[in-house]
Image (spheres, grey):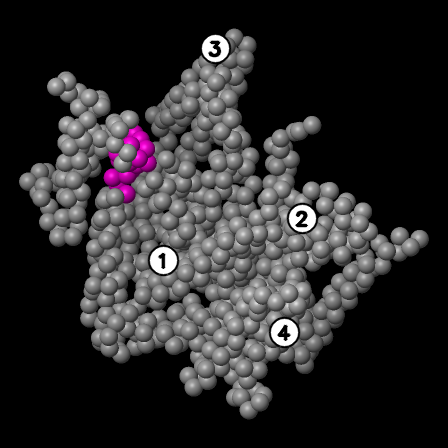
């Protein structure tokens, strides 16, 4: 009896206090909203937003609804996260491996890169790139093109845009390539297991990857043109690029800062992962006659990835959450468009802040669920 | 004399290879240094492209020559082992050396040689380098924000007092040592709060009231980080214990709380504290912006601290719990005297990382209109009298933050060594 009471009383107390706090807060919110004549609800999402966004991946202008504005912001956030993840992964893996290099200079350079970039606040780095480094770039009319087609100006980076014809055929050919590569890999594995023969799978895959899409150009009627940006004079002092694809400086500054900052953390994850493999593993693999490349591919990497992937996914999540700093340099991401402009216009603080938080929360939670599943799958099954 | 084979340097002709190798490397470095420091190109008679690549080619050949195993010369062997193991490494080594040589002159000239620090106005900055005059004039604002000049002694005094009080732990008296934990966890924060409240904020004892909107700069960075640091630690500890608890209700509430704060970006939390939170307070109740921000950041970081501490709790072997229980200790006694001291020792690096993240997150409070050092920089940058010195400001702030964070990480490393107990 006494034993049970010991367990029930603290639980009841916690539950009661949580309920009390929540009840108190909702009661206050109710009173406050009644006083101001606001009614809780999400009807505003379908109203006309009547504000413009300067950079959007989908068709959007002031006549669209708030829900559409939310979607624009979400897509912009995901775009930054996507580019940042690619950038930080490439850089992080290189720096992480460099930190293990036997070359003293390379190891030190990588170590200083990590120490330098991760000890400076991300916001400061974003400001630095946006307000200091990118502002030092020339005006469009003074810009010399790089390789004749890239224009890096104070207004952003202008690159050629792809103009496809029959893109769908090309797309299908890529899918066909991937499927055939998987089939060949399976066949090669079976061949090796049954008869001990080895196929040059890597070269076959590369060949397929080049030949099949190329065929669509020759036979399938796919063609690719480039729309190259050209400078056009609007008036005496104003110049503008026509054609091509314009990448706004906000996006460049943001992805650069996020990539460089997160890469330092990924580099540490990669280093820890590779260092976590005991020397005995490599020696054992070498003693059964595997070549250095096979050791890396079949013994070291599978084990190292087990250590590397979970913390790295965490860093990807951090990067996605950090991309909300975009609001500081007016890149139209979810926070700026929705929790900024839309909130100012509608005044619906509770609804909008909760939607924004829930969005980030669901991204985070879905990735951590995925991660837990992955962890369970790859965990070493012991005894 | 043995036959020379330049593709395969060997120990037989050690001196020949060594001297020709060193000669080639010196030429390569000389070429790069001359072009970097004196802007002259000694290989200008060659075509552009070759002249550009020549030092790299010469250096690679030179390093190839001196790559002789077991040469018997200690320094050479060490050099080969560390920076010259194969051609690829040699090229990378050269590239790094050249990059360093190339970047010294522009760096030095911007930072020191062409920089200006004299004068009081923008007109003094005529050089092509940095304008440190800007930092000099604005330094007071960068440190104290909009705090009235004649009252700044109050900030200085309270900071000095706080630092002094933090060193009480060093007093080597056995009587006091018993109460140190209590002192740091309860008494010190209270003293700190009272000091900050009455000394910096004022409004009592004849001190002039200074509203928090006027606080700013580096001192605000310190105040916010300090309080968040003090508050987030105990909250995080309770959350970690809650998450490990046997009681389902307590556990689920802790898990929900932790996962919620870890899943959202800090900037939205600050948005919440500034626009949404006032709606949840009683009508006539007013809470200062700064207090709201400190609460928000503390709760946010507490979730991260909780996860770190949970890692430490999980790492402890079950035997520790069993041993404590078999001595008849209750839940709290067991945790305070046996479990937590060991678990916290294990997670010093993780906690230090979280605190570092906290300090690096403080600039975000610009969202609610509080201007700590980065915010002050952005304000100064838009001042019409001082346009165009963004770079200097950011470099200045970056140096300050870098020193703080680097010192913190080194300190945590020392702590880790100091408290390391072998099992």
Left or right of A123: which side holds B417? Answer: right
Q: Residue at x 47, y 44 (%)?
A: A268
- According to the picture, the residue beneath numbered tag 1 turns out to be A129
Question: How many marks do you count on the picture?
Answer: 4
Q: In whole angstroms, how far apart are the C-alphas of marks 2 and 4?
A: 28 Å
| Residue stretch rendered in magenta on the structure | B76-96
Q: Is residue A225 above or below residue B191?
A: above
Q: Who is closer to the viewer here, A119 or B21?
A: B21
**Marks 3/1: CA–CA distance:** 54 Å
B370 sits to left or right of B391: right
Q: Which of the two labelled residues, at mark 2 and mark 4, occupies the earlier sequence position?
A: 4
Q: Position of residue B37 (x, y in %)?
A: 16, 52
**Marks 1 and 2: which is nearer the front?**
2
Dividing the image into 4 quarters, which one contains the N terminus of chain B? Answer: top left
Outermost residue to the right = A1
Between residue A356 and residue A92, name the one nearer to us: A92
Determine the residue positioned at 51% across, 32% down: A277
Residue ID for mark 2: B313
Name the disc covering residue B176, or none: none
């Amino acid at each position: 009896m006494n034993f049970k009471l010991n367990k029930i009383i603290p639980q009841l107390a916690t539950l009661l206090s949580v309920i009390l706090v929540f009840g108190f807060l909702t009661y206050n919110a109710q009173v406050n909203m009644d006083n101001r004549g606001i009614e809780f609800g999400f009807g505003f999402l379908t109203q006309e937003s009547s504000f413009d966004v300067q950079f959007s991946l989908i068709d959007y202008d002031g006549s669209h609804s708030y829900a559409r504005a939310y979607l624009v912001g979400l897509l912009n956030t995901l775009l930054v996260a996507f580019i940042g993840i690619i950038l930080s992964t490439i850089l992080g893996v290189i720096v992480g491996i460099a930190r293990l290099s036997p070359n003293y200079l390379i190891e030190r350079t990588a170590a200083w890169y990590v120490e330098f970039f991760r000890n400076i606040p991300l916001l400061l780095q974003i400001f630095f790139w946006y307000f200091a480094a990118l502002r030092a770039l020339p005006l469009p009319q003074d810009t010399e093109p790089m390789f004749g087609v890239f224009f890096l100006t104070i207004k952003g980076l202008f690159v050629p845009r792809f103009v496809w014809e029959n893109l769908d055929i090309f797309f299908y050919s890529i899918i066909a390539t991937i499927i055939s590569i998987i089939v060949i890999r399976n066949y090669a594995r079976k061949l090796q297991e049954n008869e001990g023969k080895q196929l040059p799978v890597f070269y076959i895959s590369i060949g397929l990857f080049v030949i099949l899409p190329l065929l669509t150009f020759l036979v399938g009627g796919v063609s690719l043109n480039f729309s190259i940006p050209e400078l056009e004079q609007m008036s005496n002092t104003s110049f503008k690029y026509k054609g091509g694809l314009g990448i706004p400086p906000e996006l460049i500054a943001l992805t650069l800062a996020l990539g460089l900052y997160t890469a330092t953390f990924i580099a540490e994850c990669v280093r820890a992962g590779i260092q976590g493999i005991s020397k005995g593993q490599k020696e054992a693999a070498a003693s059964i006659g595997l070549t250095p490349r096979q050791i890396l591919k079949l013994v070291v990497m599978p084990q190292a990835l087990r250590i590397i992937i979970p913390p790295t996914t965490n860093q990807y999540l951090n990067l996605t959450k950090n991309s909300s700093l975009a609001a500081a340099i007016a890149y139209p991401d979810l926070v700026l468009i929705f929790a900024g402009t839309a909130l100012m216009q509608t005044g619906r603080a509770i609804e909008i802040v909760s939607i924004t938080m829930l969005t980030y929360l669901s991204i985070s939670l879905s990735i951590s669920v995925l991660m837990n599943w992955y962890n369970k799958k790859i965990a070493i099954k012991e005894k | 004399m043995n036959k020379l084979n330049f593709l395969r340097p060997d120990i037989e002709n050690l001196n020949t290879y060594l001297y020709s190798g060193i000669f080639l490397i010196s030429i390569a470095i000389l070429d790069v240094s001359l072009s970097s420091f004196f802007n002259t190109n000694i290989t200008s008679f060659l075509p552009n492209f070759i002249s550009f690549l020549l030092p790299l080619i010469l250096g690679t050949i030179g390093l190839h020559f001196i790559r002789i195993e077991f040469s018997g010369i200690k320094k050479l062997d060490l050099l080969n082992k560390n920076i010259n193991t194969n051609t690829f490494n040699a090229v990378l080594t050269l590239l790094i050396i050249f990059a360093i040589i190339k970047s010294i002159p522009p760096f030095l000239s911007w930072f020191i040689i062409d920089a200006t620090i004299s004068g009081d106005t923008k007109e003094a900055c005529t050089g092509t380098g940095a304008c440190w005059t800007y930092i000099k004039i604005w330094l007071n604002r960068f440190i104290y924000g909009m705090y009235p000049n004649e009252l700044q002694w109050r900030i200085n005094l309270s900071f000095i007092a706080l630092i002094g009080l933090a060193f009480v732990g060093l007093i080597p008296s056995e009587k006091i040592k018993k109460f140190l934990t209590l002192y740091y966890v309860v008494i010190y924060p209270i003293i700190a709060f009272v000091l900050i409240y009455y000394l910096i904020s004022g409004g009592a004892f004849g001190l002039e009231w200074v509203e928090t909107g006027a606080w700013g700069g580096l001192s605000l960075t310190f105040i916010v980080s300090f309080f968040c640091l003090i508050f987030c630690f105990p909250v995080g500890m309770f959350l970690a214990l809650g998450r490990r608890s046997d009681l389902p209700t307590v556990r689920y509430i802790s898990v929900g709380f932790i996962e919620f704060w870890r899943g959202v970006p800090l900037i939205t939390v600050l948005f919440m504290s500034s626009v949404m939170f006032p709606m949840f307070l009683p009508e006539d109740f007013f809470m200062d912006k700064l207090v709201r921000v400190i609460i928000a950041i503390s709760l946010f970081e507490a979730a991260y601290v909780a996860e770190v501490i949970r890692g430490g709790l999980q790492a402890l072997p079950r035997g520790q719990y069993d041993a404590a229980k078999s001595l008849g200790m209750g839940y709290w006694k067991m945790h305070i005297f046996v479990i937590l001291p060991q678990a916290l020792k294990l997670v010093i690096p993780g906690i230090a990382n979280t605190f570092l993240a906290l300090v690096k997150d403080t600039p975000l409070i610009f969202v609610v209109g509080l201007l700590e050092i980065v915010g002050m920089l952005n304000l100064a940058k838009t001042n019409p009298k001082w346009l165009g010195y963004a770079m200097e400001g950011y470099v200045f702030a970056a140096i300050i933050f870098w020193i703080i964070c680097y010192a913190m990480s080194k300190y945590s490393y020392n702590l880790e060594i100091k408290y390391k107990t072998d099992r």
